[in-house]
Amino acid sequence: MKFPVTLLSLFSLLLGLNANAQLRNPTPAEKAALDKAVTSIENILDQFNSDDWDKEQDYYTGEIAINGHADVPMDIDNNFERQYHVKMNSDRYNTLIKPIEDKITAAMQQSDFATVQQLGKQNKALSWLTVDVYINRHTANVYPGNHAKTTKLNVTGIPYAYKTKGDGGEIEYSLLFGNWETAQNGEYGLNYHFKRPHVTPYIENIVFIVHGADDRIQQLFKKVAWADIQNALTP
């Protein structure tokens, strides 16, 4: 009975060793391109901060390794994800969240669980926001030809902005920087056409994926200096 577990453990270990073996430190040219990109990305992400929102998670560690066997010009192993949650006793909380929570409490006291569930969904939709940033994204989760699924938006400073509706009704915003004009529709979204060879010190595209409180996202479209991210791309 223990033998299959041992084989599974060994297989997992070998997979981990193989993945680590593909990672290496950036070359000077790669580091120069990454330093420029990271500065621009963090400057944009810092504009997401607000007195109404707590930044609960920031997954970027500052330590970047390169995938030496990538199928894009430069692929990194770090994550630029940030997660925000509405701040207790903030203006937003007192105006939008607290009234809903009071209604949930009242519905709970009356054992009206259907109303509790409905109000809970409203509360969640207004209370959180997540943003992810990717460098040299191979495929973007947008479907320009499927108008029932994807809507193209006009946002100042963002060359290609899309709103995509998932199969479960969830909404995701994809903000694409780089030459996506030559990208082609594929089974899993829009496939980017890279000009540079694999594993070379170039950043051809950057993709922001934002989901969560829709009213906050609309504010960010107007507030953030999105065009500054163009400085992160390799000319």
Image (spheres, rainbow, N blue to C red):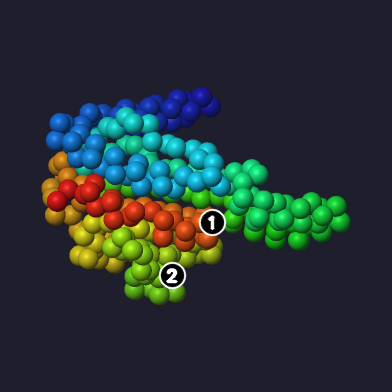
21 vs 144, left or right, is left
Query: From the viewer's perspective, is the residue at label 1 or at label 2 nearer?
Result: 1
Up/down of 12 relative to 231, above or below? above
Q: Where is residue 207 in the image (x, y as percent from the top left)?
A: 32, 53
Q: Can residue 98 be seen in this view?
A: yes
**Percent of width and height locating residue 218:** 47, 61
Q: Residue at x 44, y 37 (%)?
A: 58
Q: Nearer the viewer, residue 83 or 77?
A: 83
Rendered position, 35 above or below 85:
above
Residue topped by disc 2: 149
**Which of the 4 image quarters holds residue 192?**
bottom left
Based on the displayed image, in which of its 4 quarters is residue 81 positioned? top left
Q: Is mark 2 on a helix, strand or loop?
A: loop
State the image coordinates of residue 141 (x, y, percent, origin top left). Answer: 37, 59
The tag on residue 82 is: none
Q: Which of 91 and 54 is in front in this view?
A: 91
User: x%, y% of residue 230?
Assistant: 24, 52
Q: Mark 1 points at which residue?
A: 213
